[in-house]
Amino acid sequence: MGGSHSRDGPDLSDSDQYTDDEEEEEQSQSEEEYSTPTRNPNPSPSVSTPQSLDALDRKLKSLHLKYSNPISSPNPNSPNPNPSSSPNAVKLYLHVGGSNPSARWVPSEKLTTFSFSRRGSSDEDDSDSSPNPNAPWCLVVGSKIRAPIGPALQLKSFPAQKRVDFVADGVWAIKFLHPQGYSFFFKQYQDCLFENTYGVEATQENRVKVYGKDFIGWAQPDAADDSIWEDAKESFGPNPAKKTPRSALSIESRELLEEFEEEAAAELGIQSLALGALDNSFLVGKAGIQVVKNFSHGVHGKGVAVKFSGPGSSNQNLFSTPKKALLMRAETNMLLMSPANEGKPHTTGVNQIDIETGKVVTQWKFEKDGADITMRDITNDSKGAQLDPSESTFLGLDDNRLCRWDMRDRHGIVQNLADSAADTPVLSWTQGHQFARGTNFQCFASTGDGSIVVGSIDGKIRLYSKSSMRMAKTAFPGLGSPITHVDVTYDGKWILGTTDTYLVLICTIFIDKDGKEKTGFGGRMGNRIAAPRLLKLTPLDSHLAGVNNKFRGGQFSWVTENGKQERHLVATVGKFSIIWNFEQVKKSNHECYLNQEGLKSCYCYKIIPKEESIVDSRFMHDKFAVSDSPEAPLVVATPMKVSSFSISSRRL
């Protein structure tokens, strides 16, 4: 299975019965009429319309449009009653054929209208019905589209083509007959999206309240300080990334990626990856752990599968749904975290496994002030901490807790390993804070120096220094979608947050009052904060990714040395692993950002498709990058297989 480029599908075109010449003639006529409304040309008696003007007018009124004046239907008493002269006149297209070479756009409605409606889910054409003030704003296109406005639409705009694509039980495109119609649509779409997301009207005052005055650039990206992005020019060697031809629908490219694939142990059922920076990596499943060998071309099975065993007869139940595997102590030990109850992300303890013997040597318990508590997630103290043979501490996160746990007792002596089910040592809470309700922490990650970034269900991303977990140095506002996974570069300068429908890339760099460069982990950033970049899939790729087409596990490639820069970003979406070039994403003059309005979105990526949903995708440690490759191999795991992909420098 090779890689493929991102794609938008072929250009829009009409059927043979509706030629390009006819389209251009109609568009030219309608644009002339729209730009000179006082003109009185002789109406053509042969103009054919899909419906009477009275019916069109009734349809528009029945939608209870929020913005009725600018997009009202043409006056039926006009000397030239042509519906195509309406500024909200569009053509609707449907994409058919999926990823097949014969895939194409076909006209669905050759002349219709768009609108924004609060009528909820009702499709009845009743002009006397009242709009539901609590219903979300919906995008309505003709008689076929009524979809709530939100990130799930995956809407992508093409200003030069006066076109937008989106997903709504299929992949659709609407092409505007007038430039004014496109501009109006995009402005009102953004306003409706804001209202649906935050529950308040899209006014400047409300935007300031939502984002905060220091983050006004997130609400008005065009007014934000973009110098940080312009200065982001790390060099990845003499062979810069080539431009991605986004017009290609499906490009299988073994010249881009070289694959090594093998079966996992039949009974394993891979549920997570634990990549090592030394000799081995580990595939974690319900039944146990499979050890694989690390090579410069990827991972290779050693034929060793360790079944879970340990103290207590009920030990097997502890591993029904392994959620997180954390390597420690020079990768000789592993902490395995499993939810206490099915369907719940929280757990009351972790299991320490000796990798050489495959035994659970200790079942640790989370406790504070004599009371049992739970954790949602665990991670290493820093990016390279798993390589430390003396490591005895790790970080823990719960909905309203951030802390550090220590496997030594309060006198500094490492606790004895348990010999029976009755021995359940308690971890020492050495640092941390229990917050009041409302933080709703979801995920976290650490930098090379031990600073911590935390993502929340409200979309906020908070930065904590390595010395304090009580007060965040910086708190980035949410964009409306929960952060489900977060990662940070080794130097702490870049953060990658994962939501269901996009990745958000944030720069933490700022210049303090003394002219020194700092990050948001070490001080308050003030009001010179760059707007983030969004990394998205095209509507077509989002649809083709499969039923479970949510972004998961977005992260940087793996470095553990000061002065080295991560090269790529990777995330999993259904049956796809998606790779972005980090340098390309950061460039302000990148082609994706030209003529974009709002937050800049990057659609240039490489796709690695698999035949089933992907469990995880991660880059190996950069020590496994070889001379002819600028990046360590990418490891992609599905429930029954693990694949490794080597990226050649001349094929970027």
Image (cartoon, rainbow, N blue to C red):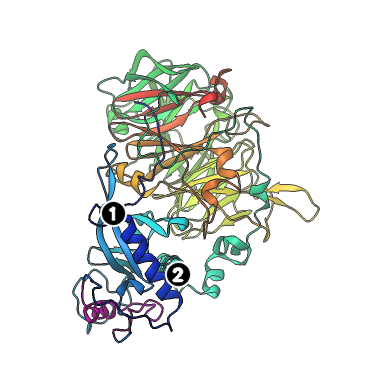
Q: Nearer the viewer, residue 174 or 494?
A: 174
Whether residue 530 sits left or right of residue 575 in the image: it is: right
Query: Does residue 35 sit above or below 414 in this rendering?
Result: below
Q: Secondary structure at mark 1?
A: loop
Q: The disc labelled 1 sits on which kind of residue?
A: Asp
Query: Does residue 453 sit above or below 108 in this rendering?
Result: above
Q: Secondary structure at mark 2?
A: helix
* Residue 14's disc number: 1
Q: Which residues are magenta?
A: 51-76
| Residue where numbered disc 2 is placed | 180
Query: Is residue 505 magenta-colored?
Result: no
Query: Is residue 62 magenta-colored?
Result: yes
The structure residue drawn at horizontal position 62% and vertical position 35%, both measured from the top left corner, is 448
Q: The disc labelled 2 sits on which kind of residue?
A: Gln
Q: Earlier in the sequence, mark 2 or mark 1?
A: 1
The structure residue drawn at horizontal position 38% and vertical position 42%, both measured from the top left corner, is 347
Pick out the residue farthest to the right: 514
Q: Nearer the viewer, residue 420 or 16?
A: 16
Q: Residues within 10 Å of mark 1 (few under 14, many from 20)?
A: some
Whether residue 65 sits left or right of residue 328 in the image: it is: left
- Judged by its main secondary structure, the magenta piece is loop
